[in-house]
Amino acid sequence: MNLRFIHVWRRNLLVWRKLAIPSMLGNLADPLLYMLGLGYGLGSMLPQMQGVSYVAFLAGGVVCSSTMFTASFEAMYSAFSRMHVQRTWDAIINAPLTLDDVVMGEWVWAASKSVLSGCAVLLVAAAMGLIGSPLALLIVPVIMLTGLVFAALGLIVTALSPSYDFFMYYFTLAITPMMLLCGVFYPLEQLPAFAQIAAQALPLTHAVALSRPLMLGVVPAHAWLHVLVLALYASVSFSVAQHYLRRRILT
Amino acid sequence: MTLLSVRGLRKSYAGKAAVAGVDFDLAPGECFGLLGPNGAGKTTTLRLALGLTLADSGSITLLDCAVPAQAREARVRAGVVPQLDNLDPDFTVRENLLVYGRYFDIPHAELEKRIPDLLEYAGLASRGDASIRALSGGMKRRLTLARALINDPDLLFLDEPTTGLDPQARHVIWERLRQLTLRGKTLLLTTHFMEEAERLCHRIAIMDNGRIISTGTPRELIAANIEPEVVEVYGDGAEAWAASAGAKLAERCEQHGETVFCYAHDARALVADLGAYSEQNNAQDLRYLHRRANLEDVFLKLTGRELRD
């Protein structure tokens, strides 16, 4: 393990710093809209969910979906720009860094950015008085792991994409279904049995299964199992992304 | 120190050989040019030498390191000017140098010392805070060149350094590159501009179809491959004249497009006959140019005349 990838991470950080304020406002505005629009708007018509208000229930899901979106966008649109359009990666691998260093840097960077956006949801939830227990702090490592999963998946799509248009397929076929089927907006048990089983194969389900109880001050059931699934998703996806990016860039 | 030594290098893509057995060595302080038409394998050779693509066979030693095994270590002391500009559009001119310097683990204080000199060299001393988007093509090239020097490399790779530049900008780059060779830097450049190769390179390897077909100084290449004098004939009647008198008086005649090139050791008879022929036939549109043979003649002879796409 070497730390050369930090150069790539720092390069991206320096770019981000130039637009840090609008970027962070975006991180806050997005979850705020979800919580207000769905949490209060839709939630006012709903009964209590698992013993809490709908908005409190929703917060534990939106933490994960925000993380998923930010990591995916960064690993796809932004990384693709740097790889394919600006040729930034080509410049970096002419220096004493390898493609593996670059890919590692992009992976950790996309995950880091998604941690900001996941934490923004936590802040919003705290400001709304929806967090009642220090257990919610354990959501931060859950966000990190979730960010690594979706950053790695996004890099696979980037490795295989001929152009930006290709990303829409991934959003339509993977991100949107996960957003709707993994328990972000309602308890998974509301789905028909086969859909519940299918949802268990999707990483977002396991992220929500960890963050929602923690948000509500409860220790999640089967916590290590969910962590294991996420860790497997992250590491296997990263290896696949690395393989396809090597093939794309180095041959 | 071995700067770059390449032996039996081969690389094919999808069954088509891009590099088909290339050998060469760089001598310290020389500017070595790989000259060839598009698709000759020049860029692939550079990528292989830098360890960015794996060869099918052959061996490469770059700056005393075996490539690809130690390519990363070798690149610590190499500089690269790529064919396509890949400056970082998110950064200013100065930040481009700073961020690139970090990739070499150069301490910040050292970078702060080097950057003003490099900006001066690139003629961008007053543009340090300018955005990349505000630079002209020539300025971008100069900045890319300065960026490649951030680690004070022992060997500089330049892939078609002046392609796409206007003549003024091209002359400025040539002048900057000559400064580098005067300072003792070793340069490996690819080009398809004869004038560039003839002006800058101490030695040239002419590449075609993945092979080096001739190597030497520009003068050696001309002396070894071609008659010293050329008469170019074009315009109405050029072909008719070439078929009759040209073929008899020249040692060799070749047609490229609408121009007939007549080669000879002494072209005086050719010129005299062209004068007489124009007068007799009142061929006012027949034009001709008598000159010394140059690298372009060698290049055309060795790589053939067909179009390369």
Image (cartoon, grey):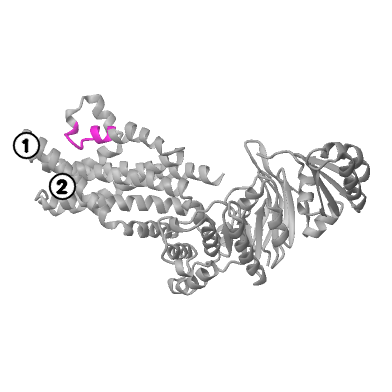
| Residue occupying image coordinates x 85% and y 46% | B262
Spatial CA distance of label 2 from label 1 is: 20 Å
Q: Quadrant of the N terminus of chain B?
A: bottom right
Relative to A59, is B300 on the left or the right?
right
Q: Which residues are magenta?
A: A177-188
Residue B208: numbered disc: none
User: Magenta stretch containing residue A84, yes or no?
Assistant: no
Q: Label 2 sits on what residue type?
A: Met
Dot 2 crowding, Cα within 10 Å, few <14, some 14–19, many 20+:
many
Q: Is residue A181 visible?
A: yes
Residue A215: numbered disc: 2
- Subunit ID for the residue under disc 2: A
For the residue pair A165 and B264, the one nearer the viewer reads as B264
Q: Position of residue A232 (x, y in %)?
A: 35, 43
- Subunit ID for the residue under disc 1: A
Q: Within the image, what quadrant is residue A155 found in?
A: top left
Q: Position of residue B99 (x, y in %)?
A: 44, 63
What is the secondary structure assignment of the residue under circle 1? Answer: helix
Q: Label 1 sits on what residue type?
A: Ser
Q: Position of residue B232 (x, y in %)?
A: 81, 47
**Height in image: A179 above or below A114?**
above
Relative to A73, is A241 on the left or the right?
right
Number of numbered discs present? Answer: 2
Q: Quadrant of the C terminus of chain B?
A: top right
Residue A44: numbered disc: 1
**Mark nearer the N terminus (2 vs 1):** 1
| Residue occupying image coordinates x 47% and y 66% | B105
Q: Position of residue B247 (x, y in %)?
A: 90, 40
Dot 1 crowding, Cα within 10 Å, few <14, some 14–19, many 20+:
few
